[in-house]
Image (cartoon, rainbow, N blue to C red):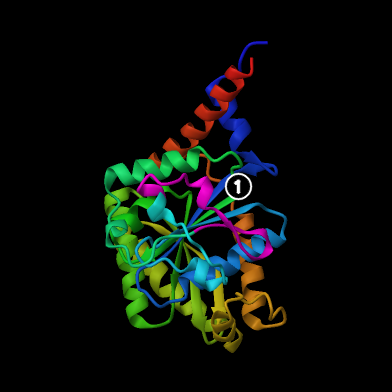
């Protein structure tokens, strides 16, 4: 039988549960807005929906996804970039079966990967033997090189902001940089720590109007997460909020997961992620050829 073409292999590998592998970057212009907490709880809800979830801690100098879910890790992305192990060897299983790639902590060299580091990361992701249904990239805050690289690789960019004016201003700055220098034309906005639905919508209105008028980009509303003491308690206990299923925040994260899952898969891949998918396809083609 004739071997499948690379295009056919690509389709086979990125088709999971009736849709493509979904690559989502969770990012923010300002630190301290609860971005990593959003990542962890979104991953938890998507996993409960039956999806295979892989979270990459992209805050590579100050990674803390593993800490937030109570994991004790001995090897991180720093070991991968040093050539001590492969990416697959540092994946840890977190609560609910979520797979986590821990970032380094206190390692200055990881804050600027450079082209070589970026290619290493993409090729290592492409070599994974079990691609996930969702790959969630938890970026650092701000507009640094690593943030822009990871956000540029994602099919969807979820920007987390709070009603704090500085957070709104920095979220706009992030969108400005990504649109001007990376050609991004659409963002999703999640308003965290809102007093109520009206406040969440007001933050969205302000950002979306400014982005449309001055940047010419679309901002879609992904919802809001209310101020909820269950979140701070869960962060201290390193459990996410899975132990508070009746909380307002838990309900908000469930709605967010359903919203994310309803987004139509992006079929036009961007530069970095096109490389990733090509790596996956090449690996599968080589495996089939070797097997006859």
Q: How many marks?
A: 1
Horizontally, residue 229 falls left or right of residue 153, namely right
Residue located at (36% from left, 48% from top): 81
Q: Is residue 268 above or below residue 79?
A: above
Could one spot residue 151 in this view of the protein?
no
Horizontally, residue 28 falls left or right of residue 40, namely left
Q: Secondary structure at mark 1?
A: loop
Task: Name the quadrant containing residue 123.
Answer: top left
**Residue 78 in magenta stretch:** no
Percent position of residue 31, x then y: 37, 74
- Residue at the spot of label 1: 132
In the image, 59 versus 32, the foreground residue is 59
Percent position of residue 28, x then y: 39, 68
In the image, the segment drawn in magenta is 80-101
Residue located at (50% from left, 27% from top): 282
Q: Is residue 23 above or below residue 49?
A: above
Percent position of residue 37, x then y: 52, 72
Residue located at (59% from left, 31% from top): 11
């Amino acid at each position: 039988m004739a071997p499948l073409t690379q295009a056919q292999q690509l389709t086979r590998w990125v088709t999971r549960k009736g849709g493509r592998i979904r690559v989502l970057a969770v990012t923010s212009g300002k630190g301290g807005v609860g971005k990593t907490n959003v990542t962890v709880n979104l991953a938890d809800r998507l996993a409960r929906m039956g999806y295979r979830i892989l979270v990459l801690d992209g805050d590579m100098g100050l990674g803390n996804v593993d800490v937030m879910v109570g994991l004790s890790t001995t090897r991180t992305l720093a070991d991968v970039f040093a050539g001590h192990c492969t990416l697959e060897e540092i994946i840890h299983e977190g609560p609910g079966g979520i797979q986590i790639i821990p970032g380094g902590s206190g390692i200055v060299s990881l804050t600027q990967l450079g082209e070589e580091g970026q290619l290493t990361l993409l090729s290592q992701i492409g070599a994974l033997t079990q691609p996930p249904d969702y790959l969630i990239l938890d970026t650092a805050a701000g507009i640094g090189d690593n943030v822009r690289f990871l956000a540029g690789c994602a099919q969807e960019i979820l920007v987390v902001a709070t009603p704090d004016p500085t957070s709104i201003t920095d979220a706009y700055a992030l969108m400005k940089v990504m649109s001007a220098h990376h050609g991004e034309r659409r963002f999703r906005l999640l308003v965290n720590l809102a007093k109520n639905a009206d406040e969440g919508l007001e933050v969205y209105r302000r950002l979306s109007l400014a982005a449309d008028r001055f940047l010419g980009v679309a901002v879609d509303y992904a919802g809001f997460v209310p101020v909820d003491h269950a979140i701070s308690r869960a962060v201290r206990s390193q459990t996410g909020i899975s132990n508070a299923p009746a909380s307002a925040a838990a309900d908000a994260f469930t709605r967010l997961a359903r919203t994310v899952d309803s987004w139509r898969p992006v079929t036009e891949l961007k530069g970095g992620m096109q490389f990733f998918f090509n790596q996956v396809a090449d690996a599968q083609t080589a495996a089939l050829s070797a097997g006859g």
